[in-house]
């Protein structure tokens, strides 16, 4: 039995992670993001993602047009950089 199989069978873990969607890392270090999550976050073929560490987690952030529009205000440019591209 794999470590995750033991971990996810614990009732406390099932309560904490009710929306768990599993993935397995291939020999090349690749994972498949479940289709439900791809649809929810607008991830399509060719979508770039930003990976970063947050504490003891790996976070995958899709870089979609919506994400870029939301982030435009952070730079204080009010979207001017989007027009320059």
Image: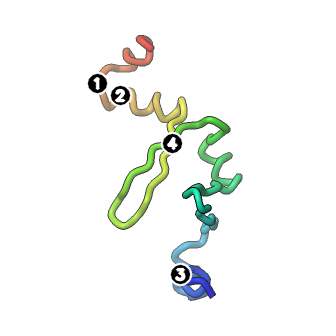
Mark 1 and mark 3: Cα distance apart in space: 41 Å
Residue 30's x, y, as percent?
Answer: 59, 55
Indicate how the structure is coloured in the image: rainbow
Marks 4,2: beta carbons within 8 A: no
Residue 76's disc number: 1
Instruction: Tell me: 72 left or right of 33.
Output: left
Mark 3 and mark 4: Cα distance apart in space: 28 Å
Foreground tag (4 vs 2): 4
Residue under circle 4?
49
- The residue at the point 62 percent across, 64 percent down is 23
Q: Residue furthest top?
A: 84
Mark 1 and mark 2: Cα distance apart in space: 5 Å
- The residue at the point 55 percent across, 83 percent down is 3
Query: Which comes sooner in the sequence, label 1 or label 3?
Result: 3
Q: Residues within 10 Å of mark 2 (few under 14, many from 20)?
A: few
Instruction: Tell me: 2 left or right of 85.
Output: right
Foreground tag (4 vs 1): 4
Q: Residues within 10 Å of mark 4 (few under 14, many from 20)?
A: few
Residue 50's x, y, as percent?
Answer: 45, 44
Residue under circle 2?
73
- The residue at the point 60 percent across, 72 percent down is 18
Foreground tag (3 vs 2): 3
Marks 1,2: beta carbons within 8 A: yes
Mark 4 and mark 2: Cα distance apart in space: 20 Å
Q: Residue furthest right?
A: 35
Query: Which comes sooner in the sequence, label 3 or label 4?
Result: 3
- The residue at the point 53 percent across, 38 percent down is 48
Residue 83's x, y, as percent?
Answer: 44, 12
Mark 3 and mark 2: Cα distance apart in space: 38 Å
Mark 4, secondary structure of its residue: strand
Instruction: Tell me: 23 left or right of 81.
Output: right
């Amino acid at each position: 039995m794999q470590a995750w199989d033991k971990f996810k069978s614990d009732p406390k873990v099932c309560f904490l992670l009710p929306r768990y969607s599993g993935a397995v890392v291939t020999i090349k270090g690749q994972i498949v993001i479940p289709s439900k999550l791809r649809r929810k976050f607008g991830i399509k073929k060719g979508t770039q993602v930003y990976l970063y560490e947050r504490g003891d987690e790996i976070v995958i952030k899709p870089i979609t047009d919506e994400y870029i529009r939301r982030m435009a205000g952070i730079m204080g440019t009010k979207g001017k950089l989007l027009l320059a591209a």
